[in-house]
Image (cartoon, rainbow, N blue to C red):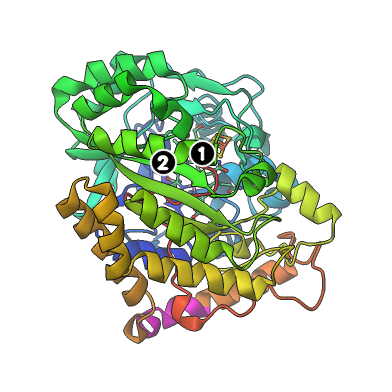
Amino acid sequence: MIRLLMIQPENREIRRFRRLQLNNFSQLTMPYLAAFVDERHYKITLADECCGRIPYRKPFDLVAITVSTPNAPHSYGIAERFRKAGAKIVMGGPHATLLPDEVEEHCDFLLAGEGEAAWPQFLEDFRRGSAQKLYAPSAPARLENLPAPRWDLLKRRRSMKGAIFATRGCPYRCRYCNLKQIYPDSFRTRPIEDVAAEIAAMPSRIFVFWDDNLFADKDYAKALFRAIAPLKRKWAAQATLRDCADDGLLALAKAAGCLYLFVGLESFSEKALGDAGKGINRVADYAPLVGKIHRHGIMIQAGIVFGFDSDTPGVFDATLDACEKLGIDGATASLLTPFPKTPIYWQLKSEGRLLSEDWSAYNSKTAVAYRPLNMSADELWRGYARFRRRFYSLGSFVRRMSASRTNVAVNLAINLGYRLSLEWGAGRKREQREQREQEWEQRERSVRRSGTSGAGAGTTGSDRAGAGRPEAESGAATVGTGGRGSGQGGP
Ligand code: B12
Ligand code: SF4
């Protein structure tokens, strides 16, 4: 029997905040990939750092790690520890797909792209001793008859909710978003009966659609909502604001249990939306569309990104003011981050404005990774941190709720949870408890320095990524009301 450890890594800064959230959705990737493993040959251990520790002391033959850009250095450190103990390492995920040449330095086997066909193939080859170094499927994965995620293997916190995906991809092309570099085609859907059956079997009554843009095909979405309404579950999802113009769609979503929608407003400036390549948003439409969503009894978690080239230091107060007037229920604010190979990345790189290519600074929450145009990196960081504190203050909540008037009790609980997370995340007690993990991260950094993580390339000199960030803010937010972590890369 091959002892397989599957790791969903989460670096210390992000993990600290997420663990404190009262309302947190599960990460899907590893429970889902575990469902493809043949347990006649593999004994699976699942570790999600958001809700548990990595069993470093136990012996494993094969360690699988899903690697995102902000978690890449952390993942390399994890791999190094298990390699020293004799395990083989296989890596996949967005960062492995984007930068296979870098990632392959830190693993024995690499899967670039989607795992549905290649992962079971790799496992079979590995078992037979004939695994190749690189798997890179050329055809888009088929999304029929997919297995249900193995939630049973995950030790989850009670507050963790379920997660599923019904579609993959997004038809749009925002300049800061990595989807077009990660997925081979624009948009695919799963059969509705498969999705409904998976929801019916889910242990949790509340779940999230971890789709990039659930409303991208409105006919599909309507049929899906009709099919799942009888299941009487509650859920959240990501959608583009423009698609929320459809009253019929919103009514069906509500009847099917939609609690709130994560909508990427990104900015209240037309100029910034132009910088972002987000032409699908029009600021003039915000008020009528937000009002419409609220009238259907659905809350709005707005994705907001700060740091576009046209943003000036006035952007933070102007955004808060606009959110309060519109009655935005929750906001997931992010620092603009030039993820590898996005159009924004190439632009900033060619302009010599990347402050670091230490990927741990690319988490959109705790560090500024590039030199903004109309303010300093420090001003951007402080303005963003202040925006979050002020948005989740009691005064702002009252002002927002007097405009929203949607599910005020639920909204209060969620806003309070977020507020407490921001405060507790800064607590000293927690600092002490995490001291030991910090030491490990330092060791990881030295592994990275001696390795080829990409750190250093493109660094522009005196400015430091994350310069000026106050210590009290270092446990900065990653998830919004419902665990949606983006605000960058959401619809
Ligand atoms: C849900 C989600 C989240 C959730 C949960 C993440 C999770 N992994 O479960 C939360 C809210 C936590 C989150 C947070 C963030 N996210 Co996010 N998130 C997503 C989203 C929308 C879906 C991911 C998902 O669950 N997909 C379904 C699962 C089943 O598939 P998958 O993870 O894509 O994996 C497939 C393949 O990659 C492969 N695979 C993956 N890992 C492995 C490992 C092995 C060994 C193998 C063989 C194969 C394999 O097989 C899978 C099936 O094909 C994606 C967009 C997307 N569609 O990918 C963004 C995305 C992954 N997130 C992104 C970002 C930027 C973030 C944040 C930085 C945002 C922020 N501003 O806070 C944070 C990161 C926090 C951190 N860790 O530091 C970017 C990542 C870019 C990058 N270069 O890494 C993406 C791609 C969004 C985008 N449009 O650019 N996110
Ligand atoms: S940011 Fe959102 S709307 Fe834009 S391409 Fe990415 S997923 Fe689609």
Can residue 421 be found in the magenta stretch?
no
On the image, numbered disc 2 is attached to which residue? Answer: 287
Query: Residue at horizontal 37%, vertical 58%?
Result: 50
Residue 327 lies, in percent from the top left, at 33, 51
Asked whether, in this view, residue 426 is left or right of residue 376, the answer is left
Evaluate whether residue 53 shows in this view. Answer: no
Q: Is residue 302 above or below residue 442?
A: above
Amino acid under disc 2: Ala
Magenta segment main secondary structure: helix
Left of 420 or right of it: where is 302?
right
State the separation of the CA atoms marked 2 and 1. Answer: 7 Å
The residue stretch that appears in magenta: 431-439
Quarter placement of the N terminus:
top left
Q: Which mark is residue 131?
A: none
Ligand 2 placement by image quarter: top right
Q: Are marks 2 and 1 in contact (CB under 8 Å)?
A: yes
Q: Nearer the viewer, residue 464 or 379?
A: 379
Residue 284 numbered tag:
1
Return the x and y of residue 382 as percentages of the image width and height.
Answer: 55, 74
- Residue at screen point 37% across, 57% down: 324
Viewer-side residue, 226 vs 120: 226
Across and down, in percent, residue 246 comes to 37, 22
In the displayed structure, would residue 35 be above or below residue 382?
above
Tell me if mark 2 has few (under 14), some (14-19) or many (20+) residues whose alpha carbon lies within 10 angstroms of its own: few
